[in-house]
Amino acid sequence: MRISRSALAGSAAAIAMLCGQPAIAEEPQGQPSWGPHIDFEGRWGGDRNLGEVDLFLPLWQDGRSLLFGDIRTRLDNQGSREGNFGIGYRRMLDNGWNLGGYGFFDLRRTDDDNLFRQATLGVEALSFDWDFRANAYLPLGDTSKSLPSTGSDPYAELQSGTIQVVTPGVTLREEQAMAGFNVEVGRRVPVFPADSGTQLRAYAGFYHFTADGAEDVTGPRLRLELTVNEVPALWPGARLTLGAELQHDDVRDTEGFLLARLRVPLYEVEDRPRLPAPVSPRTHQIRRMTDPIVRDIDIVAQTVTIGQTPEQREFAVDPRTGLPYAAVESFDAATVSEADMRAAVNSMDNSIIILNGDFAVTDPIYMADSQTLIGGGGTMPVQGETSGTIVSFTAPGQTGSVSGNLGLSAITYAGTDGALRNLTIVNHSPTGGSVNGYGNNITIADNHIVSSGRGIFFEASEHGAISGNVVRTTGDGNNGIAIYQSKGVRVSDNIVTTSGENSYGVYFFDHSDDGVVSGNRITTYSSDADGIYFENSDKGVARDNAIATAGEDADGIYFRQSNNGVASDNVITTMGDDADGINFLDSDNGAASDNAIRTSGENAEGVFISVSNSADVTGNSVVTGGANAHGIVLGMSGDGTISGNVIVTQGADSFGIELGPSYSTTIAENRIQTGVATAHGLAIIGEADDLIVRDNTFGPIGEDAISVEDDVSFVPDSSTGNIVSGTIGGATCDIDIGVFATGTVSFTDGTLCYP
């Protein structure tokens, strides 16, 4: 690398203008003068790497004395940044020594993002063979900055039959800038001739820093430097220094660095007055007038502990009720009979019962009021009585399970505020079930349920929660999760599998309003087994579920006589004939939005709406694969909206949208593609009044883009006056009109056909 003389001269001129002197000082022949330069330095350590840029700027000189500015900026790989702004004075003595002094104002942003200020004062004596230096460091302003406190998170533990919430003590910390000093002595190592431009120097030093409440940072420092002047193949005036440094103190332990420093002069070296012989002692003394000032590389700061809060312990309460637990009892199947366990569970109100091992029961377990039944190793939330802090309690012991062949449910809860957690529950009876809940605020969470009969059944239970369970049922009519005459029940994040006919994954029925089904993975394998079924239950919500059904007439989501239902953001796959993705029957104000729906059976519509007013079908992706499997069907309904959907049908006679008898329906901004010659894009097969069709994209289309087979009255677009608008391509006939009202029809590049 070479820097051109013109570039160096330009830099020198700019800096000289700033300091009020010419770029090249006019000195008598043989008298030295010094110009500005920049040193680039890198340090590489085991834990820390640093980079530095140092601008040396002569301010005044007379051939023996030099007043100069020294501006440095430094950063490291741990987020610390520092700037040093200094002024110094050096003088050459006749005996070969250079004496100097300097002062700096320092700013450092630490890796904890604290800003510290410091004054640095130093003196030095430099000769050809010896170096002596001493520096003092004086923090300025606010020398202590607060740091975030440290401590472990709160936790719960079982002690002497009670659960305690433990908040560990917190350590209070601050970062302190430290005052101190360092001294150093150096000696030329005579491995190179005295008249050589290359010299090796060794240094030994000592440093000490202190601050109130902080451990002193004290230790030795060793450094070795090899300096090469007038480096071959580089620009005139270049200086390269390579070195290694090692230091040790009790706070930072042992630190070592490799270093490299390269000088770039900011003046035309060849144009300056000729110096004395370049290898004479006088030359060495002149060169040392611009040696880098050696000082500590950082404002030394240390993290100190200024206090600690004590550990806090408090009794745990039920976060749902705020009541303390009356008892915490463990039952081990190896030592306690199932009858004794059942009797204890039935009598211990407001308690936590921990089951370890497999209890083979011959009669159902009836849980008491405000009771939690949990398997060993399971977790549950508890709350600090005073602080209100909610933490997770882990029940001690091994995994618990309950199994039997019971005509009734294996576990029944008939109180309020109960919970069943982290148990394996198996009932082999085809006429029984696994879990029944008949009270309010019941939680069924993180259980593994296998049943030859019903899975989970709630009746007359408000605000219950069923989450994180794995439920598998076999046999006909055995639903995975069923909610009967219950309000506000939430079913979330479960894995549900049913294999029998008429066995729904999740079933809300008989006025089970305000139910929410979200985040579940539901699979059914037989006919008439819908994934999610709301029957006579208003305001049901199904969102973010993954649903797959394999049987005939097994819809993904089915709303029947259930108003204000919502199906959104679900992924639905049906494989049987007559298995619709989403079905609204006699359910007003339903909404299906942003679902991904794929059906593969015959007569399996993507979305089916019948006798359901004010339906809104928006933003769905619908793909159907079977014959007579339309993308979206709406009939016997009014005030509906079908907009922004992407619809692809692949079977014979499978229309993109089929519209039966209806009124005040809007079909807008849909993208419709049909793949078979007998498949229309939009088929209007029944009398439709006040129909709006606008801005849809058809293509490619197997047969007609729009087929009209009955009396239709269109509402013209208010802005254009057109009756039908959109983009049509690839159809046999763009608009095939059977009986059509008078008016203007507008579309792009289409063909109008009459019967």
Image (cartoon, rainbow, N blue to C red):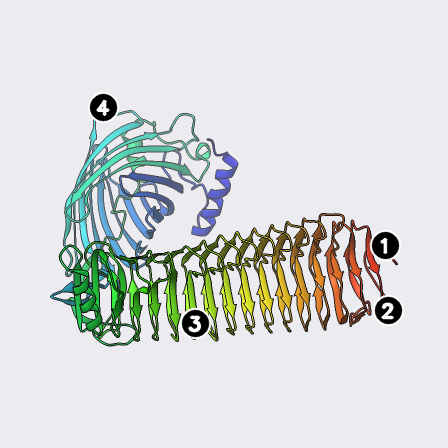
Q: Are marks 2 and 3 in contact (CB under 8 Å)?
A: no
Q: Residue 608 lies in what quarter of the image?
A: bottom right
Separation of marks 3 and 1 at Cα, in angstroms: 55 Å
Q: What residue would you read off at disc 2?
A: 743
Ranked by sequence position, the earlier of labels 3 and 4 is 4
Picture residue at 38% right of the left edge, 57% below the top: 471
List x then y, in percent, for residue 540.
Answer: 50, 70
Residue 484 is labelled as: 3
User: Which element type, helix, strand or loop, lies under badge 3?
Assistant: strand
Is 722 on the left-hand or right-hand side of 476? right
List x then y, in percent, for residue 209.
Answer: 17, 52
Q: Residues within 10 Å of mark 4 (few under 14, many from 20)?
A: few
Separation of marks 4 and 1 at Cα, in angstroms: 98 Å
Separation of marks 3 and 4 at Cα, in angstroms: 96 Å
Q: Amino acid at mark 2?
A: Gly
Q: Amino acid at mark 3?
A: Tyr
Q: What residue would you read off at disc 1?
A: 751
Q: Residue 89 versus residue 443: which sits nearer the camera?
A: 443
Separation of marks 1 and 2 at Cα, in angstroms: 16 Å
